[in-house]
Amino acid sequence: MCGIVAYVGPRQAAPIILEGLRRLEYRGYDSAGLAVIQDGQIAVRRDVGKLANLERLLGQQPVSGHIGIGHTRWATHGAPSPRNAHPHVSMNGQVVVVHNGIVENFLPLRQELEAEGVRFASETDTEVIVQLIERYMAAGADLAEATRRAMQHLKGAHAIVAMSTQAPGVLVGVRIGNAGGLTLGLGEGEMFLASDIPAILEHTRRMVFLDSREMAVVTQEGYRCYTLEGTPVTKPVHTIPWDPVLAQKGEYRHFMQKEIFEQARSITDTIRGRADFERGRIHLESLEISPKEAQRLRRAFIVACGTSYHAALVGRFLLEAIARLPAEADIGSEFRYRDPIIGPNSAVLAITQSGETVDTLAAMEEARRKGARLWSIVNVIGSQAQRLADGYILMHAGPEVGVASTKAFTASLVDEYLLACYLAQQRGLGDGRLRQLVDDLARLPDQVGRVLDRAAEYEALANEFYRASNFLYLGRGLNYPIALEGALKLKEISYIHAEGYPAGEMKHGPIALIDEHMPVLAIAVRDHVYDKMVSQMEQAKARGGRVIALATEGDDAIREKADHVIYVPETSPLLTPVLTAIPMQLLAYYIAIRRGCDVDQPRNLAKSVTVE
């Protein structure tokens, strides 16, 4: 959960950057740093821990300059340390960069640069970016062109700001994919850049939002925007209200929409510091178990409510498939009343966004009473579910305001995957398989971004189906819980009756409902049950059903089996639920909007259920 702030103008940059970082400190807190151009040189100050440590360092070693960049970091590559903290400086000391995101191909890029004689000063993936920019500036390119060329090498989703002593009044900002936004703040004779609006709102209300694969060249007099292919683009200027709640929505109409589109970033944030892509290992800083203890585990129980229960159903598959640990998923409100058979060799995992869901907490207390090992996956720091647990995984999804959970759901899926990999690691799973499981995670944020890039398709689909009175969602295996979640999302915010069903059970009742008025959404990605799903689609079509297929990119044959097809990128089968969940959210959102519903505050619902 990293934050970026940058400034160029007549004022001292460091205090403005520091105050902006303070407003973004919730986005990361293992290290912070800033850099300014001072007397023709790059002056960097950075330290581990919270922002107060950086403030203290600046008090001891002040800096002076009218252009600068700053960053607060949550680690992805390299342990928290001063040398791994941002900003990162090139080998010749003339270029400096801050960065959000994961450079998926940083290892081959690093090896390529090292072969050219580049000496790296950190363990981070970010340093390859600054060294690439230096490479092109040394060949004669200016900062903007060197940055543009460097971007062509990067895989993954990124938000980047660069500056150089060779262009002392210029900032270059880049956004690729959905690793987080990059906003330009337009002042009077001064300019700002930030990853989040609140960082700069006190200075200006006039904002420009970069889209994916766009860059901005910024001076104190103004800015120019281009595509990464070098084509100039004209961007609209948005006036942001002073209301802090409305300001948080930024360019989005609703919080739910904003939170859907934050998922590439929230997934990046929940992976940060936990997946070691260089060594193919998983580190869970607040949930540790020794190999001996992991091998003693005989069963896991995952307890949750609502959307989190659907995540629990996915988690059951993941724990069994990856860690080979028998697992059950339980609804929190049922778990405590069925007198479950659990004990010291059992692990009970609670999933709750708020950390205060009353039935989930009661299930945790029941597990504690019976002597089980108690874990939680939770979003709200300091919540009861975090405090009750022996070990926990924080989602790091950031505040989720919309009542219908979106980014917390996909973050919890990724956290269950991380936990399953960690338990497999501690239980002695072969390193080769674990290496592949970790590598698959590196590509996930970019794949999520590609799903979000197709939002217009879901809006068009919503225009066709918003009058429906009923909906049927079908899935199998790992994607059966996503069918349940898709149906729940539609019910929650559009008030359309919807059912999620395991596709193989359709002939045991639900097929009687299918006619020309019943839309059927079938999750038919390429996996080991693909042929079975296609068969279920054909049966629905034969009975007049209007079939929407959710399929894997490149599957053209499925168009003959469905009335409509929406695609997600190909990924590891164990990670498909993360990608297939997002189309469910988008379709429900656009249908609800078309029906005139209040998507952020649906009737009769509350964000956190704290009473039985």
Image: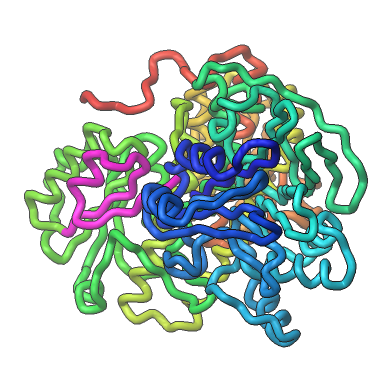
Is residue 143 visible in the rendered image? The answer is yes
Q: What colouring style does the render use?
A: rainbow
284 is higher (above) or lower (below) than 207 = below
For residue 469, above or below residue 142? above
Residue 379 falls inside the magenta stretch:
yes
Taking the image as shown, residue 260 lies to the left or right of residue 193, namely: left
Position in image of residue 237 (x %, y %): 76, 25
> Who is closer to the viewer here, 278 or 135?
135
Q: Is residue 532 visible?
A: no
How far across and down, in percent of the image, does residue 204 sit? 64, 25
Q: Which residues are magenta?
A: 373-397
The C terminus, quarter of image: top left
Which corner quadrant of the image does residue 151 belong to? Answer: bottom right
**Against 320, is 269 above or below?**
above
Q: Which residue shows up at 58% across the image and 23% down it?
A: 254
Q: Is residue 205 magenta?
A: no
196 versus 99 height, above or below: above
The x and y percentages for residue 249 are: 58, 26
Tell me the residue at 49%/76% (across/down).
280
State the residue lying farthest toward the right: 231
Indicate the position of residue 245 as horizontal and vertical percent values: 50, 21
Give the residue drawn at x 12%, y 45%: 366
Q: Quadrant of residue 166?
A: bottom right
Badge count: 0
Q: Residue at x 56, y 17 (%)?
A: 242
Residue nearer the viewer, 264 or 82: 82
